[in-house]
Amino acid sequence: MNRRRALLLLALPLGGWLGQRLVWPTPRHQRGISLRALLGDSAEFAEFSRAISKRDFKFPIDHAPHPEFRHEWWYFTGNLETATKRPFGFQLTFFRLALTARPRLSLSGWRGNQLLLGHFAITDVQAQHFHADERQHRSALEIAGTSTAPPSVWIKNWKVAITDGENHDWRLTAQTETHGLALDLISIKAPILQGDRGLSQKGNAVGNASYYYSQPRLNASGALTLAGVDYPVTGTAWVDREWGSGALEVAQEGWDWFGLQFTNYSELMFYRLRRTDSTPDPHSSGIWIDPDGKGVALNHTEVSLSCLDTWTSPNTGVRYPQRWRIDIPKLHMRLAITPRVAAQEWRGRVVYWEGAVEVSGTSNQAALTGVGYAEFTGYLAR
């Protein structure tokens, strides 16, 4: 599923809340959150546009927001290192949720029609520590908002913005009391369309889909801050962009997502939607991208995922998969995936696992290594 649907669980907690105050549900950490309970469809969303048919993608404008759709995200992840090879992972994500399909006129500058949520995390591999923070705000008074010129989204001093629309380059900045990031991302490969030429179907119902493209490899350089110490860093990043108005269907429980970058300059993305009976949903899919940027689509029958180990969060009691084997006979590929830090669990208003991983294996009998990110949602405490 659009892996980032984890944050669509904003949708229903906020669906009945369109007043002036920001009122959030308290997370039920000890039991976890049922995605199916939160992501069902609703008649109040009928006026939003839906991802129904294929479209022409145009850049740089499609890096900008699409407010006629109910939800949208800008998803940045990557692996960095210092000059002495000290490794870090990072995630900076912005989610846009339209509160109404038809904005109401108001004299109040606080009454924005869009809600923005930000997630920002640094994984310190050497210290085996996960630093994470979240923010949310209405798009109002320039405190938070989106822009088309240049394409950008921000919440206070967290911001992502296109710096070169023709080449698809980005600038990322974020700072909290404990950790910060300032990165320039230079795109090495052109955006690649996911699904059927960018239409990514997530369920059987018409419109339960998203428009989805990725930037699978960007060179990252800049500075990372931990506890007041600045570390010059370089590395690689991945960008996912999706927008739509679809819902999680009744039989879908969660998903396991992988975005991997190999040292031979190929990449792999695959997400497995899990059904309530724990079987893979047939809408699971992915893509392998060769070193020249050409994509090979993968459907749910062509990729086998095997969980080799689990990790139970001491904070929420949720048990997550930790080590995976991925077999792709079509590509003569077998991979082993291991988290760089076990405890990369998000425990904000959304409870899920997302973090930096290492990958090793073979492709056509040649050794293959790399790094990436993985996301596991819909797992509940037992």
Image (spheres, rainbow, N blue to C red):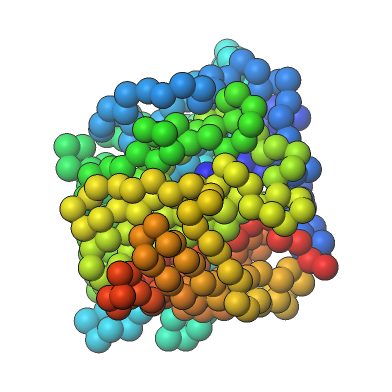
Q: Name the image quarter holding the N terminus.
A: top right
Residue at the image position 71 percent from the left and 71 percent from the top:
319
Residue 82 sits in which quadrant? bottom left
357 lies left or right of 313: left
88 lies left or right of 186: right
345 lies left or right of 177: right
Tell me: residue 312, above or below residue 95.
below
Spot occupied by residue 29 in the image (x, y as percentages of width and height): 76, 62
In this rendered view, identify the residue nearer to me: 147 or 76: 76
In this rendered view, identify the residue nearer to me: 50 or 292: 292
Tell me: residue 115, above or below residue 32.
above
Spot occupied by residue 329 in the image (x, y as percentages of width and height): 42, 62
259 lies left or right of 347: left
Q: Tally the numbered discs.
A: 0
Residue at the image position 24 percent from the left and 47 percent from the top:
294
Residue 320 sits in which quadrant? bottom right
Residue at the image position 22 percent from the left and 81 percent from the top:
83
